[in-house]
Amino acid sequence: MAQGKAPLSVTIHGGTELRRALKETAGDTDDLKDLNKKIAEIVVDEAVKHVPVRSGKLKASLKAFGAASKARATAGRKSLPYATVIHWGWPQRNIEGSFFLTNAMEKKQPQILETYHSELDKILDRNGLK
């Protein structure tokens, strides 16, 4: 991935309406939270194979989160402030980025899109929204 390239993202058009409809029919958006976590786990499972390892702390910090409106894969925490530098790089210090998260998302994009498509169909069917 070229330096300075914007991170990848997937936008679901009609997502707001879908969340609203699920709240009205199912009473919650837990299905979407679970789906989004599943998507983030796909990215994390791939990224963990490519994260640079010295102590293993950065690799262990990779986490997947799902909310009703987004999937999020993260690396680092307050005690691991170097995660951002390892991922994006720091040209002023001659540190090249490894882009382990964005490359993982790029590599797994077909699987992510297929998972969204099939799982959203299941959610719509279960809730009578199809």
Image (tube, helix red, strand yellow):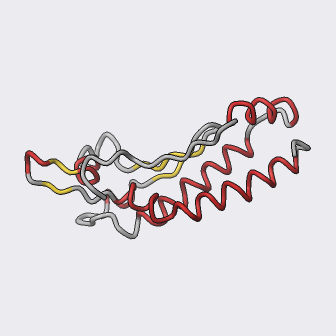
- Which residue is painted at 58% across and 59% down in the image? 112
Query: Does residue 130 lie above or below 60 as drawn?
Result: above
Q: Nearer the viewer, residue 80 or 24?
A: 24
Give percent across and percent down for residue 23. Answer: 80, 31
Relative horizontal placement of residue 39, taking residue 62 as reference (left or right): right
Where's residue 114, x and y in %?
A: 65, 61
Tell me what residue is drawn at x 39 percent, y 47 percent. Answer: 7
- The quadrant of the image that shows the N terminus is bottom left
Q: Quadrant of the rendered structure where residue 52 is? A: bottom left
Of all residues, the one furthest to the left in this rendering is 93
Q: Residue furthest right?
A: 128
Residue at the extreme bottom of the image, as rendered: 49
Residue appearing at x 42%, y 55% in the figure: 62
Q: Is residue 62 left or right of residue 52?
A: right
Q: Is residue 126 above or below residue 57?
A: above
- Among the 4 quarters of the image, the one containing residue 68: top right
